[in-house]
Amino acid sequence: MTGFEFQELELRGAYLIHNFFAGDNRGGFTKCFEKNIFLNAGISFQLNETFVSRSMKNVIRGLHFQTRNPQAKLVSVLSGRVWDVIVDIRVGSPTYKNWIAHELSAENHLGFFIPRGFAHGFASLEDNTVMLYQCDGKYDSETDTGILFNDSTIGIEWPVGEKIAILSQRDLGLMSFKEYEKKIAKC
């Protein structure tokens, strides 16, 4: 028994993962990745970097990706709750421009496997929400970019209203989906 459950999503290659969790009156233990278990589930993942973000309630981050050398990601929540979103930006994919979202929390022990070619973002639903990102692929600062969270072409229905959303200047300046398509057409 692995303790992991893998639910393949309608966006081909993406998975919702029920991470291994064991808990008792002392607290709990969560495992977010084990190479051989993931391989047996059909997910090849080579850990290149790990980082953690902390967000206050109503923060929206994303939709982020790299245009050259895109990374696959495993994301989960260590503390708090997020509404996590992935968008298929793989030109030619049958689910191109489609998005899916799930609530990830420290309590539900869910994570996302986000394959290469997806944009990722989230809305923090609680103060001091801490997310763990594990990335497969080298970080490429030159092509680290994204699409505006509220782009009408994608039509994401965020649980945080735009008037109360807290965004970085970088995220407010991200490109539209139409700009993304023009940029990709040049490649």
Image (cartoon, rainbow, N blue to C red):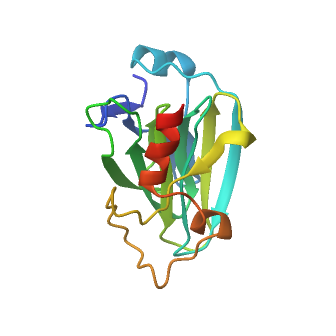
Q: Can residue 106 be seen in this view?
A: no
The image position of residue 22, as x and y in percent, is 49, 41
* Residue reaching furthest to the right: 141
The image position of residue 139, as x and y in percent, is 71, 35
* Position of the C terminus by quadrant: top right
Disc tally is 0
Task: Classify residue 53 as left or right of residue 40.
Answer: right
- In the image, is residue 33 above or below residue 36? below
* Residue drawn where x is 49% and y is 59% of the image: 122
Q: Between 125 and 88, which is closer to the camera in this rendering?
A: 88
The image position of residue 168, as x and y in percent, is 65, 69
Q: Can residue 134 be seen in this view?
A: yes
Task: Classify residue 41 as left or right of residue 80.
Answer: left
* Position of the N terminus by quadrant: top left
Task: Classify residue 183 as left or right of residue 159.
Answer: right
- In the image, is residue 80 above or below residue 100? below
* Residue drawn where x is 61% and y is 49% of the image: 145
* Residue reaching furthest to the bottom: 163
* Residue drawn where x is 46% and y is 39% of the image: 118
Q: Between 27 and 176, which is closer to the camera in this rendering?
A: 176
Task: Classify residue 171 as left or right of residue 118.
Answer: right
- In the image, is residue 138 above or below residue 121? above
The image position of residue 60, as x and y in percent, is 53, 67
* Residue drawn where x is 42% and y is 75% of the image: 160
Q: Between 55 and 119, which is closer to the camera in this rendering?
A: 119
